[in-house]
Image (cartoon, grey):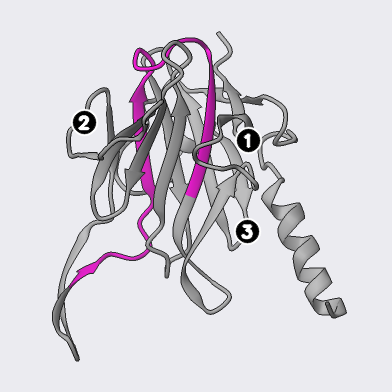
């Protein structure tokens, strides 16, 4: 590995573990900031209500914003203007020990992992959550015929009822995909960096201080 590659590797590692709001190691509990304003599901993290959010910075200018009020947990994933910015959020149910995945791209859905493995995605069956998916943006001609287009540069947003998952500390994994990075237009970055979707022991704890 040449010196430039070493430099890039170190830069990506340090960026993936840095916080704009707090300095917290991925193996420790991340404290989510409270808010007095509900998060608007408008495809923008930059509005005033997100100013108080806990912010996690990932490589390729990707940021994750987290906040909560007494009723909801809010998440916004922000990419670059040329990114689709898809979101995968995984949450462990503290009582059933089942794993829940919330996926937001051109569609939105939830699936659950039990002892039998991952179940099918309940697409558009929004039970206790809502979000802002990648908007449809018309069609375009290609050499293989017309295809659908989807908007670049919007941000993925998700709100989940706090009644859906027990307790004031949730075990979670976050994936942000559809990112342009190093000559690819579909890179996914994870938090924690080495988390695995079917291994909750690799996830991080996130707390809602009361």
Counting from the top left corner in percent of width and height, residue 180 is at 49, 70
Tell whether position 62 is magenta. no
In this rendering, is residue 176 above or below 150?
Answer: above
- Secondary element under disc 2, as helix, strand or loop, is loop
Counting from the top left corner in percent of width and height, residue 124 is at 17, 39
* Residue 171 figure quarter: top right
Name the quarter where the N terminus is drawn: bottom right
| 19 horizontally vs 127: left or right | right
Q: Say which residue label 3 marks.
A: 59
| 57 horizontally vs 50: left or right | right
| Total numbered circles | 3
Name the residue rendered at 48%, 14% in the picture.
Answer: 94
Give me the C-alpha separation between circle 3 and circle 2: 30 Å
Q: Which callout, 3 or 2, points at the residue further toward the start of the chain?
A: 3
Give me the C-alpha separation between circle 2 and circle 1: 27 Å
Counting from the top left corner in percent of width and height, residue 201 is at 62, 30
- Secondary element under disc 3, as helix, strand or loop, is loop
Estimate how packed mark 1 is, as few (under 14), some (14 to 19) or many (20 or more) residues with alpha carbons within 10 Å.
some
Tell whether position 157 is magenta. yes
Query: Which residues fall within the magenta stretch?
Result: 148-175
Q: Say which residue label 1 marks.
A: 202
Counting from the top left corner in percent of width and height, residue 85 is at 41, 57
Name the residue rendered at 23%, 57% in the picture.
Answer: 135
Mark sitting on residue 126: 2
Estimate how packed mark 2 is, as few (under 14), some (14 to 19) or many (20 or more) residues with alpha carbons within 10 Å.
few
Q: Nearer the viewer, mark 3 or mark 1?
A: 1
Q: Which callout, 2 or 1, points at the residue further toward the start of the chain?
A: 2
């Amino acid at each position: 590995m040449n010196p430039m590659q070493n430099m890039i590797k170190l830069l990506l590692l340090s960026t993936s573990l840095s916080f704009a709001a707090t300095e917290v190691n991925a193996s420790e509990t991340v404290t989510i900031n409270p808010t007095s304003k509900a998060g608007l599901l408008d495809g923008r993290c930059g509005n005033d209500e997100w100013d108080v959010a806990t912010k996690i910075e990932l490589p390729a200018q990707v940021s994750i914003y987290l906040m909560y009020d007494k009723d909801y947990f809010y998440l916004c994933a922000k990419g670059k203007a040329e990114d689709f910015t898809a979101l995968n959020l995984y949450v462990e149910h503290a009582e059933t020990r089942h794993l829940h995945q919330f996926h937001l791209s051109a569609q939105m859905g939830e699936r659950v992992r039990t002892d039998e493995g991952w179940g099918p995605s309940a697409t558009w069956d929004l039970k206790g959550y809502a979000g802002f998916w990648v908007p449809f943006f018309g069609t375009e001609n290609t050499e293989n015929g017309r295809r659908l287009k989807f908007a670049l540069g919007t941000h993925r947003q998700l709100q989940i009822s706090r009644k859906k998952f027990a307790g004031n500390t949730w075990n979670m994994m976050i994936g942000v995909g559809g990112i342009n990075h190093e000559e690819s237009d579909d890179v996914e970055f994870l938090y924690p960096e080495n988390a695995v979707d079917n291994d909750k022991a690799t996830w991080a704890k996130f707390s809602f201080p009361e």
